[in-house]
Image (tube, grey):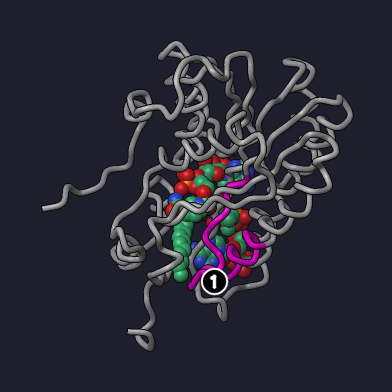
Amino acid sequence: MTKPMTIPNDADFANSPLPFSGDCFKGQLVLVSGGGSGIGKATAWCFARLGAHIIITGRTEQKLIDTVAALTSAGLSASYKIQDIRDYDGIAAMYADIFAEFGRLDILINNAGGQFPQSAIDFSKNGWDAVVSNNLNGSWYMMQHAARQWRDRKQQGSIVNIVAVVPRGMNGGAHTCAARAGVIHLSKTVAVEWAEYNIRVNCVAPGVIFSEGMRAYSPEALSEFDKSNPMKRFGTPWDIAQACVYLGGPSGSFITGEVLTLDGGGQLWGDLWMHGRPDYFR
Ligand SMILES: CCCCCCCCCCC/C=C/C(=O)SCCNC(=O)CCNC(=O)[C@H](O)C(C)(C)COP(=O)(O)OP(=O)(O)OC[C@H]1O[C@@H](n2cnc3c(N)ncnc32)[C@H](O)[C@@H]1OP(=O)(O)O
Ligand SMILES: NC(=O)C1=CN([C@@H]2O[C@H](COP(=O)(O)OP(=O)(O)OC[C@H]3O[C@@H](n4cnc5c(N)ncnc54)[C@H](OP(=O)(O)O)[C@@H]3O)[C@@H](O)[C@H]2O)C=CC1
């Protein structure tokens, strides 16, 4: 019988095998938005264990405090900032503070985001606006303000945007699909525009990843998620974290404007309904 999945925690991330070894990010500063849970937390752990100082951001202070405490008690270097990614001016001020304190930022992992599952025909105007604002506008504000700092200081930078697997749409998630597709094509565009400034911009597209984020989905929808790919299972936050390290760091130095999909082959094979499969499609 397959072992039931559990959401991995700090202790798991402290002990998972690393994709690289040594202190290859020593002296570097990495900002992970939404780093207080799930994929963001795993990514923070992965970079921190490879020597980087990590700044995690999010809206809920307690999650940030707990994650920083777990990292620092493992002897790693981390701090946090409370920041809503929808706050354009607040983000500009946050980067100004970071550059004043550290004098640099090497990698932005633009991970914060989220949505709710619903049939598109039922979206309220506010529901649509909330999801597009969070995932498209919020991702853009985080990218643009970082890029302005890098350009003005003549420093190189690297951005990894966490998106989703959008080529065949996202049933029950049309708002987030539109927003993530927007981020992907925004990234391809600025990957070219910002090459002049030595700024690389890439995307990581997770399929179904078993994280705290899964609590937003009904048991009915969840019971189908692991059947949406030919591997018939969820991926882990650590899978995504390692991809962020690969693309964001020096190993990705000749990669820009790319989307790395980690979905167990789902985009080639399965279908997935974020709010449960309607009877018509059974
Ligand atoms: C074919 C192959 C396909 C393979 C594809 C694989 C795809 C993988 C599947 C993807 C699974 C994705 C997983 C994840 O993303 S996990 C992370 C999930 N985490 C979260 O989503 C948490 C964050 N979410 C939020 O913060 C919120 O959802 C939101 C983004 C909306 C922000 O909310 P905000 O605080 O701004 O919103 P309000 O509460 O003020 O509400 C604003 C309006 O939105 C309406 N709303 C909110 N929630 C719901 C809901 N559950 N149902 C319906 N409507 C909702 C709310 O009512 C407001 O509108 P009104 O004023 O009109 O009421
Ligand atoms: N798990 C999956 O299967 C997939 C996840 N994704 C995406 O990956 C990313 C990480 O998801 P995951 O780790 O699974 O889920 P989580 O819900 O654990 O992570 C989302 C994080 O983003 C933060 N966040 C959300 N909205 C904002 C905001 N407006 N400002 C600042 N921070 C915000 C949340 O913190 P707080 O609420 O405290 O601010 C939270 O820490 C998300 O963008 C998600 O949509 C994409 C495809 C699949």
Which quadrant of the view contains residue 123? bottom right
Q: Quadrant of residue 103?
A: top right
Residue that mark 1 sits on: 169
| 9 displayed left or right of 95 | left
- Is label 1's Cβ within 8 Å of ligand 1? yes
List the single residue furthest toward the top.
Answer: 75
Residue 62, placed above or below residue 263:
above
Element at badge 1? loop
Q: Residue furthest front?
A: 254
Residue 252: quadrant of the picture = top right
Amino acid bearing label 1: Gly
Asked if the stretch drawn in magenta spans residue 188, the answer is no
Image quarter hosting the C terminus:
bottom left
Q: Residue furthest left?
A: 1
* Residue found farthest to the bottom: 280
Q: Is residue 166 above or below residue 46?
A: below
Residue 109 seen anywhere in this rendered image of the structure = yes
Q: Is residue 219 visible?
A: no
The front one of 127 and 151 is: 151
Q: Residue at x 68, y 44 (%)?
A: 256
Label 1, residues with CA under 10 Å away: few <14, some 14-19, many ≥20: some
Residue shown at 66% from the left, 56% from the top: 184
Which residue: 61% across, 37% down? 109
Q: Name the residue located 54 percent from the left edge and 50 percent from the top edge.
A: 260
Give coordinates of residue 198: x percent, y percent. 79, 34
Q: Position of residue 262 (x, y in %)?
A: 45, 51
Range drawn in magenta: 161-181
